[in-house]
Image (cartoon, rainbow, N blue to C red):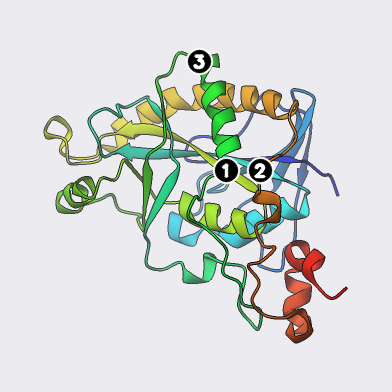
């Protein structure tokens, strides 16, 4: 099986990375089912990269239907250590304008139907991972620096509110989220961040602002047509930023703590781990098993 140390998850509109060379499609079977699509593994800036279209090519999965665990576990099986995620979002604050980029450092959960896709653990092995700081700061730094390769306006920090979807917010909901101090709103990234932490992979989001949600007096309804227009404009910038980020990452090893996030997080002693669950989580917990 091909391996890659850097993974890229493409959101709405970002279904490919045209600069990838020596490309091959890799289908991965995980203990959590099939990922959204085949991984596109290729060379970018002399670094092997695994690219995955989050919603599948042709946009076949709604946010609630996404196989989050299979997607992240598949990355782990390919040897990925750092995940760069691109995601379309709505702005909840005036200063995040359409076509801007945001690199959030916090998440807020408003999903309701994804309990089974929010953790790898259970079935006899209990873990409580630290998640106060859900984004890898080092990876966020790289994304911020990489935005300099384009002329986009980038904002570092802020909170990404993850809603269930697939419908956009009501105006009442949007105004409440604003009153809470939320910055951008999307439908996918929280589960990815949680699972990446459990899988001991670095994770950071490049949020592509497409609209002002529905709170803005001049934009009081989210037009799908408008979202698509801004999304298409943002996609090319996102591809350039990702390419630049890969180049920077290829020159620097990991010095953060993401690679040992589970060291003290597994509460169940190894001698009580059920064999079936132990096998299922092998890629994540093997190094913490019986010595």
Q: Residue furthest left?
A: 217
Near-viewer residue (188 or 190): 190
Residue displayed at 29% across by 33% down: 211
Badge 1 marks a residue whose secondary structure is loop
Establish if 198 lies above or below 227. Answer: below
Is there CB contact under 8 Å for labels 1 and 2? yes
Query: Which residue is labeled 1 in the image?
Result: 136
Distance in Å between CA atoms under marks 3 and 1: 22 Å
Between 141 and 217, the one lying in front of the other is 141
Quarter of the rendering occupied by the C terminus? bottom right
* Residue located at (40% from left, 20% from top): 153
Q: Residue 235: x and y, percent?
A: 49, 27
Question: Residue 203: x and y, percent?
Answer: 58, 45
Q: How many marks?
A: 3
Residue at point 47%, 55% (across, down): 132
Circle 3: element type: loop
Front residue of 109/255: it is: 255
Indicate left or right for 77 with 189 as reference: right
Q: Residue at label 3?
A: 150
Q: Give the Cα separation between the discs numbered 1 and 2.
A: 8 Å
Up/down of 273 relative to 208, above or below: below
Q: Are marks 3 and 2 in contact (CB under 8 Å)?
A: no
Q: Point out the tag, 3 or 1, that comes first from the N-terminus.
A: 1
**Residue 35 visible in the shown view:** no
Q: Quadrant of residue 221?
A: top left
Query: Residue drawn 47% across and 53% down?
Result: 190
- Residue 125, position in %: x, y? 66, 79
Disc 2 element: loop
Q: Which residue is mark 2?
A: 256
Q: Earlier in the sequence, mark 1 or mark 2?
A: 1
Q: Earlier in the sequence, mark 3 or mark 2?
A: 3
């Amino acid at each position: 099986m091909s391996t890659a140390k850097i993974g890229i998850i493409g959101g709405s509109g970002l279904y490919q990375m045209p600069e990838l060379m020596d490309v091959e499609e890799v289908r991965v079977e995980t203990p959590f089912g099939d990922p959204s699509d085949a991984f596109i593994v290729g060379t970018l800036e002399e670094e092997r990269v695994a690219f995955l279209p989050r919603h599948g090519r042709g946009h076949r999965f709604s946010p609630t239907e996404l196989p989050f665990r299979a997607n992240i576990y598949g990355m782990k099986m390919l040897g990925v250590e750092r995940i760069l995620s691109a995601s379309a979002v709505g702005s909840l604050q005036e200063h995040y304008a359409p076509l801007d980029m945001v690199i959030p450092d916090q998440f807020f959960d408003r999903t309701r139907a994804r309990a089974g896709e929010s953790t790898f653990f259970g079935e006899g092995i209990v873990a409580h991972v630290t998640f106060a700081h859900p984004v890898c700061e080092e990876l966020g730094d790289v994304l911020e620096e990489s935005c300099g390769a384009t002329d986009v306006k980038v904002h570092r920090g802020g909170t990404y509110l993850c809603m269930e979807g697939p419908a956009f917010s009501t105006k009442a909901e949007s105004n409440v989220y604003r009153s809470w101090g939320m910055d951008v709103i999307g439908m996918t990234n929280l589960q990815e961040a949680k699972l990446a932490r459990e899988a001991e992979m670095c994770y950071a989001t490049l949020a592509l602002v497409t609209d002002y949600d529905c709170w803005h007096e001049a934009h009081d309804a989210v037009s799908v047509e408008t979202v698509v227009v801004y999304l298409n404009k943002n996609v090319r910038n996102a591809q350039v930023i990702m390419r630049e980020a890969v180049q920077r990452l290829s020159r620097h090893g990991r010095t953060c703590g993401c690679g040992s996030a589970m060291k003290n997080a597994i509460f169940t002693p190894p001698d009580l781990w059920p064999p079936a669950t132990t096998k299922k989580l092998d890629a994540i917990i093997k190094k913490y098993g019986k010595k």
